[in-house]
Amino acid sequence: MSGISYDLKEKVVVVTGGSRGIGLELARHFLAAGARVVICGRKEANLAAAVETLGGGERLLAIPAHVAREGDVENLFDTAVHRFGGLDILINNVGMNLLTASVTDSDLAVWNKIIEGNLTGAFLCSRKAARILREKKRGKIVNISSLAGTKASPGMGIYGIAKAGLEMLTKVLACELAPFNIQVNAIAPGVVRTDFSKPFWSTPAIHDQIVKAVPAGRIAEIADLVPIVLLLASGHADYITGQTLLVDGGASVI
């Protein structure tokens, strides 16, 4: 991505779920672009490992937080603002899934856990971030959704419902926050080669079945997503809001 300027120097970015996978790589690239980055995660050991991987430094802060808990979210953003003097960008990256045979046969506890992890957390973080960003009358929120929010997928029913909710949250917030010069967008990848989706792509038979449904002929790599997120978080996207960009190799068109 050398040669592309996203104009992110000194911007303060909160990346939820930033200790691994997509979140970790986003944190790495925001740091490389000169931003000040706050990552959060539920496990302190994972956060410590992420800080070491990212090289530490004064522009990186790791805070333990469960984004579906209001108190944790308040502490996350208050600490970020206290440490770095403000907030410019929120990346709602936290997501979780429990493979379910069907929605109708799922327990309420499973439903609640998946909805909390993918939608409630994004609501709480977006609400807190918006209240900060409204004061400065500018900012960006980028949500990490999924093709499952648009296209029903076996074993991902509740997850897909949560991601569909996230995409509507994106639209509603975009409308509410537009008068404050805050843009809210999302990206929706298909299967990405991360530990999160490893049960799908690590089994050759399942992998091959997934790839057959992707016109591009492969599953996504994290590198396919990073430039799109950085674009939406930058000033180049000031006139884009309320959109969910499908980054799926064409899987949504067949």
Image: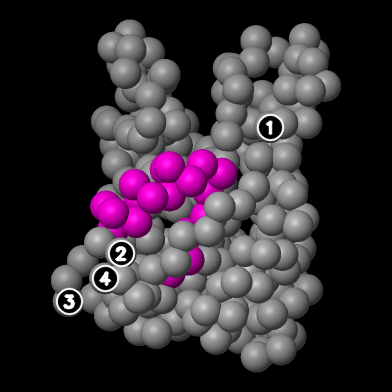
Give the amino acid at mark 2: Gly
Circles 1, 4 touching at the beta carbon (< 8 Å): no
Give the amino acid at mark 4: Ala
Q: Which residue is mark 4?
A: 32
Quadrant location of the N terminus in the rendered image: bottom left
Circles 2, 1 touching at the beta carbon (< 8 Å): no
Give the amino acid at mark 1: Ile
- Residue 33 drawn at (x, y percent): 30, 75
* 235 on left or right of 219: right
- Residue 75 drawn at (x, y percent): 67, 64
Mark closer to the observer (2, 3):
2
Give the amino acid at mark 3: Gly
- Residue 197 drawn at (x, y percent): 43, 28
Query: For residue 108: magenta?
Result: no
Nearer the N terminus, badge 2 or badge 1?
2
Nearer the N terminus, badge 4 or badge 2?
4
In this picture, which residue range is highlighted in magenta? 37-54
Residue at 53%, 48% (x, y): give it: 41
Report how far apart the C-alphas of labels 4 and 3 lie in the structure: 13 Å
Q: Which residue is mark 1?
A: 114
Residue at 61%, 52% (x, y): give it: 65
Nearer the N terminus, badge 4 or badge 3?
3
Nearer the N terminus, badge 3 or badge 1?
3
Report how far apart the C-alphas of labels 4 and 2 lie in the structure: 12 Å
What is the secondary structure assignment of the residue under circle 2?
loop
Report how far apart the C-alphas of labels 1 and 4 lie in the structure: 32 Å
Q: Is residue 172 visible?
A: yes
Q: Is residue 246 visible?
A: no
- Residue 158 drawn at (x, y percent): 70, 27
